[in-house]
Amino acid sequence: MNVRKTVITKETIEADAVWEACRPITRVVAAAVIRNPFAGRFVEDLSPLFDMGEQLGERLMDAVVAMLPGPAVSYGKAAIVGVAGDQEHGGAMTHPKLGKPMRAAVGGGKALIPSNVKVAAAGALIDLPLGHKDEVWSFDHFDTITVMVADAPRPDEIVLFMAVADGGRPHPRVGSAPITD
């Protein structure tokens, strides 16, 4: 696996959009820019990308979680594939093996890890979805963080993003899904 660079972004939210103070919520995102070994060609077997996703999760997730001041309660993942690649290349990076090191790093993870994948040019933004790590129906933890790497992905690259947070949205008021028949 060829890694060009990694980027870690940390943000702390201290107030909502109308300046009402909230309990500080920290969100940390790791991005890894790798060369896409399948750029420019159709390949049926994408399993090498499965393994790369897992390796990057093992390499970056513990450090990302350690940057949170509180326990990780939310997580998410995303990928941007350069224009010489295929959306499925990003899917192969985020599924099926990335989840294992992400769950290990957050100490649980009963819920699916929300994800997003797209093909785009260098500097593109992606909305990385976040959700509670154990309670899939915790609406107060449904959130996104918009991320990017300014010079990536180049046409033959993939940017893989992994995120954790120690809280949901500021001043959540939605709750959980009601049980209906």
Image (cartoon, helix red, strand yellow):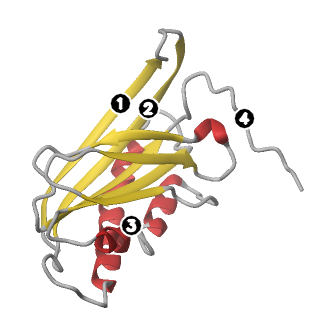
In the rendering, which numbered label is found on residue 11?
1
Q: Are marks 2 and 4 in contact (CB under 8 Å)?
A: no
Amino acid on which the number 1 mark rests in the picture: Glu
Amino acid on which the number 4 mark rests in the picture: Gly
Out of 18 and 50, give the one closest to the viewer: 18
Q: Which tag, 4 or 3, sits closer to the chain's start?
A: 3
In the rendering, which numbered label is found on residue 26?
2
In the image, residue 13 above or below residue 44: above
Check disc 4 and report the residue beneath it: 175
**Residue located at (18% from left, 80% from top):** 38
Give the residue furthest to the bottom.
44
Side (left or right) of 169 relative to 54: right
Out of 39 and 159, give the one closest to the viewer: 39
Q: Which tag, 2 or 1, sits closer to the chain's start?
A: 1
Check disc 3 and report the residue beneath it: 94
Side (left or right) of 130 relative to 98: right
Q: Are marks 3 and 2 in contact (CB under 8 Å)?
A: no
Q: Which tag, 2 or 4, sits closer to the chain's start?
A: 2
**Residue 37 drawn at (x, y percent):** 16, 78
Amino acid on which the number 2 mark rests in the picture: Thr
Q: Is residue 67 visible?
A: no
In the image, residue 5 above or below residue 1: above
Mark 4 to mark 1: distance in Å? 24 Å
Q: Residues within 10 Å of mark 3 (few under 14, many from 20)?
A: many
